[in-house]
Image (cartoon, rainbow, N blue to C red):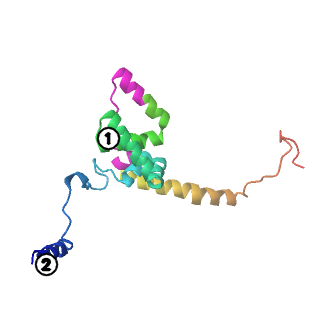
Amino acid sequence: MKLVLALCLLAVQGFQAPRPRPAAQIKQSAFLDDDDGSIWDTLLRNGPISFGIRVARPDFYEETVVTYMETKGVDRLEAQRRMDFMFNDPNGFGVNELREEQLGEKINYNVKSGVQNRPVFSAFWAAWCFYFFFIFLPTRVSELGGIDFTPSKFDIMGPYN
């Protein structure tokens, strides 16, 4: 009888929802929020290089963030933003680290960038740049006769034959 009861309890436990573990829960935040740590936040704050490393090499990215958290004693979001900045501009990050150690100057990597401060302006500017460089400029150059790649008599490199 005890065996049947134990088997029934095991069968019922298999259909129960898993218990949430507080340490393993991922904090959800709104898009473009101050405490957003998503890949889109990485893209908008630090550009395509940090975003590419985070997407293409997630194990390396995670190892780098965890190592920085352990060595500097900062929280995950701060370490993530610092590593994003480091991947984007390693020399600038090194200079900032030296300034923090030697001068005590605290660099805030949690400040929103221009795209996050002004998303409407950024979208307008991106659309205008796309239009100018990919629609207007090629059309105007072709209207004026295109680009002539034949050598001129003032060619300093000599004849091309």
Q: Can you name the residue that lies furthest to the left here?
A: 1
Q: 10 Å neighbourhood of mark 1: few (<14), some, or many (≥20)? A: some
Query: Is tag 2's residue or tag 1's residue first in the polypeptide sequence?
Result: 2
Residue 97 shown in magenta: yes
Give the magenta-colored segment's residue range: 96-117
Q: Position of residue 52 (x, y in %)?
A: 48, 52
Say if the magenta span includes residue 76: no
As helix, strand or loop, the secondary structure at mark 2 comes to helix
Residues 73 and 2: in front is 2
The tag on residue 78 is: 1
Q: What residue type is labelled 2?
A: Val
The residue that mark 2 highlights is: 4
| Residue positioned 48% across, 38% down in the render | 89
Check residue 113 in the rendering and tell me which mark sits there, or answer none.
none
Instruction: Using the image as rendered, state which of residue 50 and residue 3 is in the foreground.
Output: 3
Q: What residue is at 48 percent from the left and 36 percent from the top?
A: 90
Residue furthest to the top in view is 102
Camera-side mark, 2 or 1? 2
Q: Position of residue 136 (x, y in %)?
A: 58, 58
| Nearer to the camera, 7 or 29 | 7
Q: Element type at marker 1?
A: helix
